[in-house]
Image (cartoon, rainbow, N blue to C red):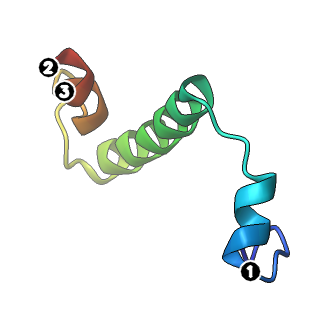
Amino acid sequence: MVRAGQSSERAAMIYQHSNLDRQRDVADGIDARVQAEREKAGDVPDDQASGTQRARDV
């Protein structure tokens, strides 16, 4: 709401256009960034699936 400049939840809902594909795109982007940061820090083995991937495999 704040980033888009809407002053109320109602206004935000009017302009919110989200579908499953867009939600997956956003989740994939977040997952990729988290994985990159964790790998950079040495926290995750390369062959370990991310939480997003594990959820999709269920």
Location of mark 1 (residue): 8
Quote the CA–CA distance across marks 2 and 1. Answer: 37 Å
Inspect the image, locate mark 3, and give the three-letter code of the amino acid beneath it.
Arg
Q: Position of residue 46 (x, y in %)?
A: 23, 26
Residue located 81% across and 54% down the image = 15
Query: In this rendering, is residue 41 above or below 39?
Result: below
Check if mark 2's residue and mark 1's residue have beta carbons within 8 Å: no
Residue located 37% across and 47% down the image = 40
Residue located 53% across and 27% down the image = 20
Q: Position of residue 26 (x, y in %)?
A: 56, 39
Residue located 36% across and 40% down the image = 35
Locate residue 1 relative to residue 15 in the image: left or right: left
In this view of the protein, which residue sits in the foreground, 14 or 30? 14
In this view of the protein, which residue sits in the foreground, 38 or 32? 32
Q: Nearer the viewer, mark 3 or mark 2?
A: 2
Location of mark 3 (residue): 54
